[in-house]
């Protein structure tokens, strides 16, 4: 393996770990009394300078054409669905369910892309895709069954699961539009300005619904928000982008399937979330379904 591929492999694994760690950090912050929109505003506010710097660097390096009105609307739509709404619904859902179940539900987004592409773009769903979708949702059902046995109320599992599933739908819609934007604007520019739009939307949501004084949180919450911004937002975005440049999208996507397994382990290690047979079987089915739906031929 040449050094470039080795670095790409390391970045892909670290990126998967970083994204998987987000749910753990959120769960660690909630006992301090912080609400979802305040925690999200702290995370996005701390991430905002990075995304502006990324866009500015890309502007200097490539000197691309000015954004058209259509480009601006597309980037705003991507920021709304992919980073603002999906994140907000995810944060809300984690009030109710375990980090491991959240990651399994969220990880089913590739199957949602298949379904939404069939509904809105007229792309047929193949038999193999239907089998993959069945695998994923059988796995999620097993994981839900596990959470129902360890939680105090089934209502919390259904509310939290529904919120996280809505987050996955929002993220799938983002992915459908992201391909079009990347072809026209480039990956760095799309990521930078769509993320910047999302950060501004999150901060505006906070400013309109919460007193600004809520940004003054206990030191542990601020540290967790900073860790979320750096290790579960900024660095993973950059590392996955670099890994894709070195390895290609296929290998990086495959490595990304480690996500639910990592979250399952971290939830057990840090949050003392119990691991059951249903959860292990469910996680295996979800990962298998996502791997198969991503394969061609």
Image (spheres, grey):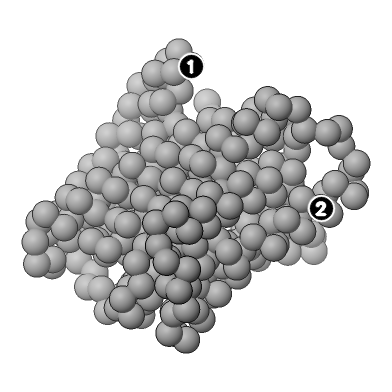
Q: Alpha-carbon neighbours of circle 2 within 10 Å: few (<14), some, or many (≥20)? A: some
Check disc 2 and report the residue beneath it: 56
Q: Give the quadrant of the N terminus.
A: bottom right
Mark on residue 226? Answer: none
Q: What residue sits 69% from the left and 63% below the top? A: 49
Image quadrant assignment for residue 120: top left
Left or right side of 121 for 247: right
Label 1 vs label 2, nearer the camera: 2
- Expressed as whole percent of the image width and height from the top left, the position of residue 154 reads 10, 56
- Could you tell me which secondary element the residue under label 1 belongs to? helix
Relative depth, front residue between 69 and 225 = 69
- Expressed as whole percent of the image width and height from the top left, the position of residue 33 reads 31, 76
Left or right side of 95 for 228: right
- Expressed as whole percent of the image width and height from the top left, the position of residue 274 reads 22, 73
Q: What residue sits 33% from the left and 27% below the top? A: 130
Relative depth, front residue between 37 and 188 = 37
- Could you tell me which secondary element the residue under label 2 belongs to? helix
Question: Is residue 248 something one can see in this rendering?
Answer: no
Q: Alpha-carbon neighbours of circle 1 within 10 Å: few (<14), some, or many (≥20)? A: few
Q: What residue sits 11% from the left and 54% below the top? A: 155
Could you give the CA–CA distance between mark 1 and mark 2, rounded to whole angstroms? 34 Å
Closer to the chain start, of discs 1 and 2, is 2
Measured along the vertical axis of the image, is residue 78 above or below residue 43?
above
- Expressed as whole percent of the image width and height from the top left, the position of residue 246 reads 75, 52
Question: Is residue 217 something one can see in this rendering?
Answer: yes
Left or right side of 248 for 61: right
Residue situated furthest top in the rendering: 122
Relative depth, front residue between 60 and 237 = 60
Mark on residue 121? Answer: 1
Image quadrant assignment for residue 93: bottom left
């Amino acid at each position: 393996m040449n050094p470039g591929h080795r670095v790409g492999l390391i970045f892909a694994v670290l990126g998967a770990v970083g994204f998987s760690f987000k749910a753990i950090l959120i769960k660690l912050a909630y006992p301090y009394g912080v609400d979802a929109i305040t925690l999200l505003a702290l995370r996005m506010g701390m991430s905002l300078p990075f995304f502006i710097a990324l866009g500015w660097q890309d502007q200097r390096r490539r000197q691309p054409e000015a954004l058209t009105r259509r480009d601006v609307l597309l980037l705003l739509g991507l920021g709304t669905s992919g980073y603002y709404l999906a994140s907000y619904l995810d944060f809300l859902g984690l009030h109710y369910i375990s980090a491991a179940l959240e990651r399994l539900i969220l990880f089913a987004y590739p199957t949602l892309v298949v379904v939404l592409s069939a509904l809105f773009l007229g792309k047929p769903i193949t038999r193999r895709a239907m089998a993959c979708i069945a695998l994923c949702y059988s796995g999620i059902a097993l994981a839900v069954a596990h959470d129902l046995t360890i939680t105090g109320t089934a209502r919390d599992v259904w509310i939290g699961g529904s919120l996280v599933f809505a987050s996955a739908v929002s993220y799938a819609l983002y992915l459908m539009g992201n391909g079009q934007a990347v072809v026209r604007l480039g990956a760095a520019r799309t990521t930078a300005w769509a993320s910047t739009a999302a950060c501004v939307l999150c901060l505006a949501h906070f400013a309109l619904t919460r007193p600004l004084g809520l940004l003054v949180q206990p030191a542990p919450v601020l540290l967790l928000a900073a860790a979320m911004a750096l290790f579960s937002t900024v660095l993973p975005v950059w590392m996955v982008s670099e890994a894709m440049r070195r390895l290609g999208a296929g290998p990086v996507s495959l490595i990304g399937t480690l996500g639910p397994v990592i979250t399952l382990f971290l939830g057990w290690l840090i949050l003392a979330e119990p691991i059951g047979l249903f959860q292990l079987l469910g996680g295996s089915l979800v990962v298998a379904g996502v791997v198969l739906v991503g394969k061609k031929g």
